[in-house]
Amino acid sequence: MPPPPPSFELLPGADDSPVILHVPHSAREIPDAVRAGIVLDDAALERELDHITDAHTAELAEAAAGLAAVTPWRFVNRLSRLVVDPERFPDEREEMLAVGMGAVYTRTTHRTELRPDGTDPEPLIERYFRPYARAMTEAVAGRLAATGRAVVIDVHSYPREVLPYELHGAGPRPAVCVGTDAFHTPPELAELAGKMFARCGETGLNSPFSGAYVPLEFYGRDRRVGALMVEIRRDTYMTEPGGPVVGPGLSGPASALAGLVDGASR
């Protein structure tokens, strides 16, 4: 029997690039053993994956990497966030626990049951979350060792209409939302993102989603690690909720992301 596919992948970039494009939510794959713990039937699970998956963001990061003058590194989650969400805090610090969507989700985007109440998250955290976190920590450490700094650019998408799980969905929903962190996002990086993505439509800061991913070993401690989140509204490039790329598709966002990568590499 062939070995199972890797749950994540680090795709090398240029030796002198400090940039890591992080793609945590693009996949739909759920291992059979994990699927057994999800209460949805197959049709309902497919609908939930349509809503929760940041469809085509791995292709977007790949296209941007190909356009960039200095090829960034890419860290791509190959499993669905319904297995574990690698960007959540794995403890009580995570605000999304309020809606059953901590590191291991127990509720869906529409706040219905995904896993039974009382599900122990620890086996999934140990099997999937911690190895992912270690590998991402090592990837950032590698860029620090090679270039003296690291810039993590999170690549996400989000729906045009508010989903019930969103805690901060009442604000603007621009074509591109730029998420920042008070400690890890230099103002010039956020400004550059706004400038690059202006070609894709209206841009905004931290609405409806805010923050940026940094491995916990560096989080709030090491300013050499910069971070920024890019959230592209899905209707600007695809058929919602989980359909194909349409119209110009990824060309505009990929070009903008490549410009951001090049600016962050300098």
Image: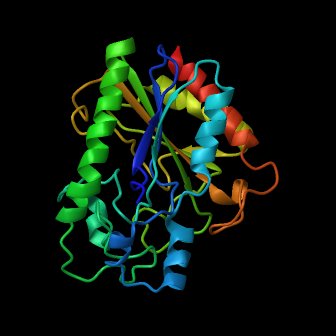
Residue furthest to the right: 247
Percent from the top left, x then y, of residue 224? 32, 20
- Tell me if residue 217 comes above or below residue 223 in the rendering: below
Front position in the image: 18 or 223: 18
- Tell me if residue 94 comes above or below residue 182 in the rendering: below
> 202 left or right of 83?
right
Percent from the top left, x then y, of residue 88? 31, 54
Image quadrant in which you'd find residue 196: top right
Percent from the top left, x then y, of residue 136? 33, 37
- Name the colouring of the figure: rainbow
Percent from the top left, x then y, of residue 53? 52, 62
Picture residue at 17% right of the left edge, 63% below the top: 122
> 39 left or right of 254?
left
- The quadrant the N terminus occupies is bottom left
Residue 18 visible somewhere in the drawing: yes
Residue 148 visible somewhere in the drawing: no
Front position in the image: 225 or 43: 43
Picture residue at 39% right of the left edge, 27% below the top: 226
Residue furthest to the front: 1
Picture residue at 67% right of the left edge, 46% below the top: 202
Q: How many badges with numbers are in the image?
A: 0
Picture residue at 25% right of the left edge, 31% below the top: 218
- Tell me if residue 44 comes above or below residue 235 in the rendering: below
- Tell me if residue 21 comes above or below residue 165 in the rendering: above
